[in-house]
Amino acid sequence: MRVLFAVFWLFLAGPVLARPAAHAPQPVDYVDPFIGTDGTGHTSPAASRPFGMVQPGPDNAGTGWAYTSGYQYRAPDIVGFSQNRASGTGIPELGDVLLQPSQTRRDSFVSRYDKASERARPGYYAVTLADNGVRVELTASLRAAFHRYTFDKGGRVWVLVDLQHGLTFLTDRQPVLSNQTESTPFGLEGVSHRRNWTTRTIAFSLEFDHRVAERITLPSRPDDAAPRYLLGFDLGNGHVLEAKIGLANTDVAGARLNRSEISDWNFDRVAAEARAEWNALLVRATIEGPRDQQRIFATALYHAFLHPSVISDCDGRWRGPDELIHTAKQGLRYSTFSLWDSFRAAMPLYTLLVPERVDDFANSLLDHADASGRLPLWPIWGGETGTMIGEPALPVLADAWAKGFRGFDGPRALAAMIRTSSEDHALSQWSIFDRYGYYPYDKVEGEAVSRTLEASIGDDAVARMATMLGDKAAASRFASRAQGWRKLIDPETRLARGRDSAGKWRTPFDPLKPTSPLNNPGDYTEANAWQYSWTPALLDPQGLAAAMGGTAAFQAMLDRFFFGLKPSAGAEYLGQEALIGQYAHGNEPSHHIAWLYAYTDHPEIGHQLVSRIARSFYKDSPAGIIGNEDAGQMSAWYVFASLGFYPAQPASGQYVAGIPLVRRARLAVPGHTPLLIERIGEGDRLVRVTAAGQPLAPTAMPHRALNRGGTLRFVTANGLP
């Protein structure tokens, strides 16, 4: 049954709430944080504020690719509750300051848990630990975690504080380079220097609402470099123990200041504030549709708004990739930018729905560049992981400037973009690229084709930024270099194929074999030739169509890609999942490809595919995200698909039209005129798109036209009068 709305923010409560909602349904009531927690989505039901520094939540394990967020829905045990994590990434990181309560002192505090007791909603998580005799509830402010433990009985109770714990992949435990911890009457404070995915500093200030009655330092295990404590508390006739934990990447003073965001011991107030903050954000984009579609959409918005994460303390201090403490001149500073993923759709989504944060995002990237000498690739907790390829910060900055954001310095941004695109580092060896105009596979260590194609995306972004700022020389230089992708389009196969420094094509050539630097070295990054050959469309779709033989040949290639080739098997670790032919929605290089039918004579095929992808690979269930969520990118794709347009050229300030998956949607951003989105008619053949009554080109819908508000109308063939 289709639910009709007079006001779009009326929602039905979901089953994961702690109690049935007695109020009129709100957007927050639709969100199910368990979506994506079963399988490869790698999300977590942890409590968080929007873009929060902390995400206190359950860890089922500390090691392994399946536990990159610490959690898997079907895991039977909980080892404890750590205070920070990344949502849906492919590599584990963070998981700091693990706490685990128990009614009694036990040899192991690992506990089975009652699955039926588990509850999660935005800003709140709760579970009953069956072996430990305690109900755990978690909530958070922006920078501090809040725990409430309700024990089966009073008297002496215990809390394990594990400072060695951290989420890791290649080792049993995160290496701790140094650690300092001091006891306080009501808790612990300290700072650790750790190395895992990146090198980072974690400072914490832990305070309980009861004085610590007994402290036991547990024996060190092999490879331990940080302590584990058992803290005993006397509750008397009471049953409740509470804890607040402030985190920082600066120092203990910063962690203590961040803890003070929670000024008292009113857990329910903090949880209610978290709910209200989420609701105020989620109401910015609402849809009309069936209940399951509402839940998938609201949860996608929720996941998209978990990252990037605030990294600056309450006083504006933050530790950068140079490991020095800096102070933001104004605004917030962010980290956890999964840029290789998020430049495609998540970052453009923020320009549409949270424009008040975009300038701070840009300034965070630029401050990072000042500290490290170049724009970031994949920063987390203020550090740089050096993960993935290309220069994905470049289209983010160009897109923001193209859309009219002026809260960051344009010439400063262009200078950082040019420096990042000129000075060699491990994965952007510009001296080689400039010599050949591409990356020869015999001159670089793998991923030569993918790196060439991604370099073109960045060069195009620099050229666009230089053009907007009037730097003709830079615009010409980088516009020319952005054509490097053309050197790798093989005229025989019309696919992007490796070439050596003598210009000879890679042989033998298997265009269906996916490769990855970690598991299966080759010319492509977590993909194969068929999947990566569509990358130039992110900057020049018409040029790619011409290189593939013209519009008809371009469509024939798309048709073969989706319908004429069998899916790859056995390489899920490379994102080869959520497959339609060779299309792999489980990994980002495929995300724009269905939208490319807009540049053919049969855009309706793309509309059908977008609808099929959304219906097949997004579900209202814990297994509802197929492929890593990747800090919001997977969910941002769904949000755009639902609304009927997509940033297929993410540095352009424009969108490509599809057909909305809903009859109506409403975007209501404070300070902006609301945008009503309507689909008129059924079917897959789009006849016209109008904004405020004015026609829009389906392949070039300007952001500014949408930003003016009014009505965005998609009319299909059978919707004509």
Image (spheres, rainbow, N blue to C red):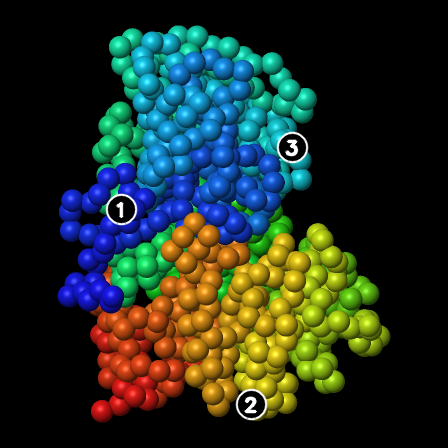
Circle 3: element type:
loop
Nearer to us: label 2 or label 1: 2
Marks 2 and 3, the one that precedes in the sequence: 3
Does residue 636 sit above or below 500 in this rendering?
A: above
Mark 1 residue type:
Glu
Q: Where is residue 381 drawn, in percent x and y?
A: 51, 41
Q: How many marks?
A: 3
Circle 1: element type:
helix
Nearer to us: label 2 or label 3: 3
Cβ–Cβ under 8 Å for marks 2 and 1? no
Q: In which quarter of the image is the N terminus?
A: bottom left
Cβ–Cβ under 8 Å for marks 2 and 3? no
Residue 619 occupies quadrant: bottom left
Q: Report, in whole angstroms, how far the alpha carbon at label 2 lies from the one at label 3.
A: 53 Å
Give the residue displayed 50% in from the left and 52% down from the top. Answer: 41
Marks 3 and 1, the one that precedes in the sequence: 3
Which residue is tagged 1? Answer: 277
Q: Report, in whole angstroms, how far the alpha carbon at label 3 lies from the one at label 1.
A: 38 Å
Which residue is tagged 2? Answer: 551
Mark 3 residue type:
Asp
Give the residue displayed 50% in from the left and 87% down from the top. Answer: 600
Does residue 400 sit above or below 43 in this rendering?
A: below
Query: Dot 3: few (<14), some (14–19), or many (≥20) neighbours within 10 Å?
Result: some
Query: Dot 1: few (<14), some (14–19), or many (≥20) neighbours within 10 Å?
Result: some
Give the residue displayed 27% in from the left and 30% down from the top. Answer: 267
Horizontal arrangement in the rendering, residue 521 relative to residue 598 (left or right): right
Circle 2: element type:
helix
Mark 2 residue type:
Thr
Q: Report, in whole angstroms, how far the alpha carbon at label 2 lies from the one at label 1.
A: 47 Å
Q: Is residue 481 visible?
A: no
Q: Check residue 172 in the rendering and tell me which mark sits there, or answer none.
A: 3
